[in-house]
Amino acid sequence: MPSYDVMPDVQLFQPAEVDDALNLVDQYGKDGWILGGGQDTYGWLKDRAKHPTALIDLNGIEALHGIRETVDGIEIGATTTLREIIASPLINRDFELLVRAASRVASPQIRNVGTLGGNVSQDARCWYYRRGLACYRAGGNICYADSPQGMNREHALFDASRCVAISPSDTATALVALEATMIARSVNGSRNIAAEDFFVGPATHITNMTSLESDEILTAVQIPSRWAGSRFYFEKVADRDVWDFALVSIAVVMKMDGDTIAKSRFVCGGVACTPYRLLDVEKAARGKTLSDESGDAIAALASQGAKPLNYNHFKIPLMENLVRRAMRG
Amino acid sequence: MDLVMYKNDVWGREVILGVSWELLWVVVVAAFVVIAAHAIIVGNRKQAPRPSSEGKHIERHDGKDRIFHWVMAASVMVLLVTGIFPIIGIEFSWLTLHWVAGLVLTASVVFHIVRSLFWQDLASMNIRPSDLKETFSTAKKPGKYSIEQKGMHAAVTVLVLLVIGSGLVMFAMIDTPWWERTNSLSEATLGWVFLIHGLSTLALIAAISLHIYFSLRPEKLFYTRSMIKGWISEEELKAHHDPDKWPKDSA
């Protein structure tokens, strides 16, 4: 597959209003490509692995940008950059988990231009798929990663269905843990989608990572106040400290009742095609204190049901150890 | 419009990917046109009086065969919904439902094959040259099955065996409770399997559309009733079949 340094011939639209962008998305449908920070886009287009006819650049739309306090939490515009999220006093005060997750995305340069909407909507990073091979996710009839010779060190432990790619987004795990709501708009109206339902696995939609339809734009992310100021834990394990995707990550929110955990949400990244809730861990953590002993007691629950591939068994102890570390006092 | 979709395999060679699903709409439109044309033509004809369903009952389908038919019908419907809906954009978690329904269909077809080979009169479904005379002469009546019914049975037999055969190969290519997938077929071979599965599915959609249409036509409703209750009346037998051939052809 050839790789180019230049963009292909594609029409660029830079609407200034959301309605104009929605009309363009409606007009071009699957031939249109929504552009945020471009960090997922340019690779696809320069590799000639995707062939949209229209780029719809959302960065000029003021209404999609910024962080606003709402009656019940905050709303972050989809084109708000990761750097702006990291620097936001409001988010630092109430939802530091998202700050920690955003701080671990890629590199400083990428965080300067990468947007929250783009980070949660980015496509799978499976190299067979990104290479332009006609795998299941590309509409084909085979998974190259899950074959006897397939290199699947970074791939899924859970919920694979034909495709074994994982969700690459660091902020996605934090948003699922914080019970965020994604706001999707089309010319036909607006949809509020729970973050947990926003990300879809291959059993449901093998060619999409999210439940966004081709005529919809993710306009904002709302985070309710119910977890504001809670105890947070985020950790990402990757081969490199910067500019790398998670091998496994964990985002945890906990409501404490004195010294014990009253309520929690544990979400792992890098182990399934969607942010993966550790429901058994959450149940077991209730009433426990934060300690090494508690961590040891519940860590093994994290990997129950895992189906490792040829080269990713190491993710099982990695998941368990991340739960242990989240449970430390 | 393409009949077949192609892709480049991992070595860059062009191989078959599967059937072009644009054909689905061709099949749907063609089936609708045939059904509409038939309905208009038959509707303009003078209708013969319908025989009474009262009187003596003649068994047409044994209980086991009726159960087989409806199990097969249900499984085929589930297979079509779970196979086709995601292709036309209605997304849901379909794969497990699909293969479970496929196994039900396979088991029911195996049951039917064994039963027809050893307990039924398989020859009654054979299409003979003499059957063609039924088409051109109203005086010539069929035995238990008309040539149209035999033709539909033959077509569905071939298509279901093709869809099951290709489906079982595809089944081996996914993870199940009994094995993990092997991905052991070459991409070219896999493409042929997908093509056969897709083409036989499209042909089945056409065949089933016609089957359902004819089973709901007023003059054929007694056949549908016989597939539910098992019998036709003596008058219906005399009106549509040759009673002398009936016992010979009957199971």
Image (cartoon, rainbow, N blue to C red):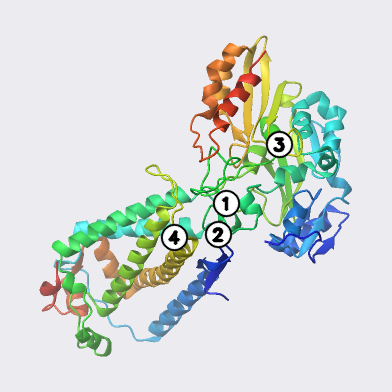
Q: Distance between the residues labelled 2 and 1?
A: 10 Å
Q: Which residue position is annotated with label 1? A: A206
Q: Which chain carries label 3?
A: A
Label 1, secondary structure: give it.
loop
Mark 2: give few (<14), some (14-19) or many (20+) Cα within 10 Å. Answer: some
Q: Which chain carries label 4?
A: B
Q: Check contact, mark 4 vs mark 1: CB within 8 A.
A: no
Front position among marks 3 and 4: 3
Q: Distance between the residues labelled 1 and 3?
A: 21 Å
Tell me, yes or no, if residue A287 can be seen here.
no
Q: Which residue position is annotated with label 4? A: B80
Q: Distance between the residues labelled 3 and 4?
A: 38 Å
Tell me, yes or no, if residue B149 can be seen here.
yes
Mark 1: give few (<14), some (14-19) or many (20+) Cα within 10 Å. Answer: many
Question: What residue type is disc 4 on?
Answer: Leu
Label 2, secondary structure: give it.
loop
Q: Which of marks 2 and 1 is nearer the N terminus?
A: 2
Question: What residue type is disc 1 on?
Answer: Ile
